Image (cartoon, rainbow, N blue to C red):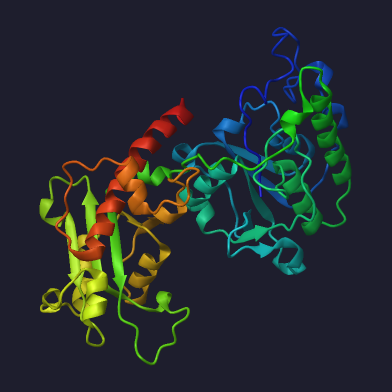
């Protein structure tokens, strides 16, 4: 899928021309003339259009391989920006477009029959955190079918660190994809040869120590915050739900996604003019009596369910609370599955679980992270029980991420 390489630190990615600032450059590949590889790039008449969606930080990188792809392929185009600028960009995608992205629902390109192969293939050019953010933030990409490659050997992008042993650069991913989609297409080996030459020339340069480019996994420090969290269309609604009781006849495995909410708590951020709508809490009528041990687990008591709502009453009240244009934020996809199970209103949504907010220490729970990192003073919610505590933690985390994301996006756009 796109460039999965991570930009190296300043010492590692030092361009060989830095010691000679006035050295003439090629204005096609942007490399010094002594490092120019343009004569090696073939002209390839591909039928499948390659649409490169490039994160803005990749645009001027000296070793960006999307530049080589555009120079070689007959049918390719590039759109460059960050999440904020690309969210409404026209990508020119047709009905037979697909996204090269290894999601859980992705189909392996090699297994596609001829009549199901995409005529346009979107490839993201950026680091893994950037790619994940673009896929999540851009509505043009969300609706596309996902396709993936199955690399059998490591990529050769040794001048930039890779997240794992089989990650590919943008160029390598495009070449492998075209080999699957157009097996008879010629000169792809020549394009790989130009890429290998570029890599080797850089490694051979006397100012570069090859040990700096031995690869390695990413540090995990990137926050990868969705732009929609920082610049929501309207307001953000943070929600948390407790699953309804499982029926006695139900099996114990795989049924979380098949149950609706027993408790549903939500808080709206940034709507001071409608204070009566800021908080939402519902206790739904249970399917069977709640045991004391189960209530204790939820931090609740029987009196919380004395005036419980039916599913229809919950749907109606939730529909009034959740406004068109809101962004719904839940901790886990199961929260969305609860609403879907009872046919409750849904708007644009995202999950906190998909955001890397913990950094390198992935062992901390959300509650532990909030306690250690987020502001805790002068913030109280009226919600009760375990759902209330977890909702409060989620709200604190959203506030933290919005501040951090605003800072990051300002840096990107600058």
Along the line of sight, which residue is nearer the eye, 224 or 121?
224
Residue 7 location in percent, x, y? 62, 33
Residue 164 location in percent, x, y? 68, 48
Say if 221 sits above or below 298 in the image: above
Position of 231 with respect to 308 (left or right) is right
Residue 57 location in percent, x, y? 56, 31
Along the line of sight, which residue is nearer the eye, 226 or 209?
209
Along the line of sight, which residue is nearer the eye, 132 or 87?
132
Q: Residue at x 87, y 27 (%)?
A: 39
Q: How many marks?
A: 0
Say if 329 sits above or below 203 in the image: below
Along the line of sight, which residue is nearer the eye, 327 or 284?
284
Q: Residue at x 73, y 8 (%)?
A: 20
Position of 366 with respect to 61 (left or right) is left
The reply to whether residue 236 is visible in this rendering is no
Say if 97 sits above or below 174 in the image: below
The reply to whether residue 405 is visible in this rendering is yes
Position of 38 with respect to 366 (left or right) is right
Residue 8 location in percent, x, y? 63, 30
């Amino acid at each position: 899928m796109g460039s999965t390489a991570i930009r190296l630190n300043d010492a590692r990615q030092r361009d060989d021309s830095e010691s000679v600032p006035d050295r003439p450059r090629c204005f096609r590949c942007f490399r010094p003339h002594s490092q120019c590889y343009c004569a090696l790039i073939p002209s390839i008449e591909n039928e499948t259009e390659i649409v490169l969606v490039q994160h803005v930080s990749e645009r001027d990188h000296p070793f960006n391989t999307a530049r080589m792809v555009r120079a070689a392929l007959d049918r390719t185009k590039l759109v460059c920006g960050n999440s904020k600028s690309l969210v409404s960009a026209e990508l020119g995608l047709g009905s037979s477009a697909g996204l090269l992205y290894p999601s859980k629902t992705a189909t392996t390109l090699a297994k596609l029959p001829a009549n199901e192969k995409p005529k346009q293939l979107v490839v993201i050019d950026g680091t893994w955190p950037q790619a994940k953010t673009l896929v999540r933030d851009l509505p043009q990409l969300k609706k596309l079918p996902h396709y993936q490659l199955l690399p059998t050997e490591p990529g050769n992008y040794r001048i930039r660190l890779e997240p794992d042993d089989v990650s590919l650069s943008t160029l390598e991913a495009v070449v492998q994809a075209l080999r699957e989609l157009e097996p008879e297409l010629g000169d792809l080996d020549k394009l790989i040869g130009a890429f290998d030459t570029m890599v080797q020339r850089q490694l051979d340069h006397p100012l570069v120590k090859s040990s700096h480019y031995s690869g390695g996994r990413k540090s995990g420090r990137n926050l990868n915050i969705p732009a929609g969290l920082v610049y929501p269309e309207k307001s953000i609604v943070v929600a948390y739900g407790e699953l309804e009781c499982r029926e006695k006849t139900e099996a114990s495995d795989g049924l979380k996604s098949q149950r609706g909410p027993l408790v549903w708590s939500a808080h709206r951020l940034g709507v001071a003019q409608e204070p009566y709508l800021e908080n939402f809490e519902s206790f739904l009528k249970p399917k069977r009596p709640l045991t004391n041990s189960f209530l204790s687990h939820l931090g609740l008591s029987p009196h919380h369910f004395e005036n419980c709502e039916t599913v229809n009453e919950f749907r109606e009240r939730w529909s009034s609370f959740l406004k068109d244009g809101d962004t719904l934020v839940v901790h886990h996809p199961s929260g969305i599955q609860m609403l879907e199970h009872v046919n409750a209103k849904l708007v644009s949504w995202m999950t906190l679980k998909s955001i890397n907010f913990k950094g390198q220490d992935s062992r901390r729970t959300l509650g532990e992270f909030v306690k250690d990192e987020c502001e805790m003073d002068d913030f109280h919610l009226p919600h009760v029980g375990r759902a209330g505590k977890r909702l409060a933690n989620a709200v604190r985390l959203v506030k933290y991420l919005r501040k951090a994301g605003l800072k990051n996006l300002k840096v990107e756009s600058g």
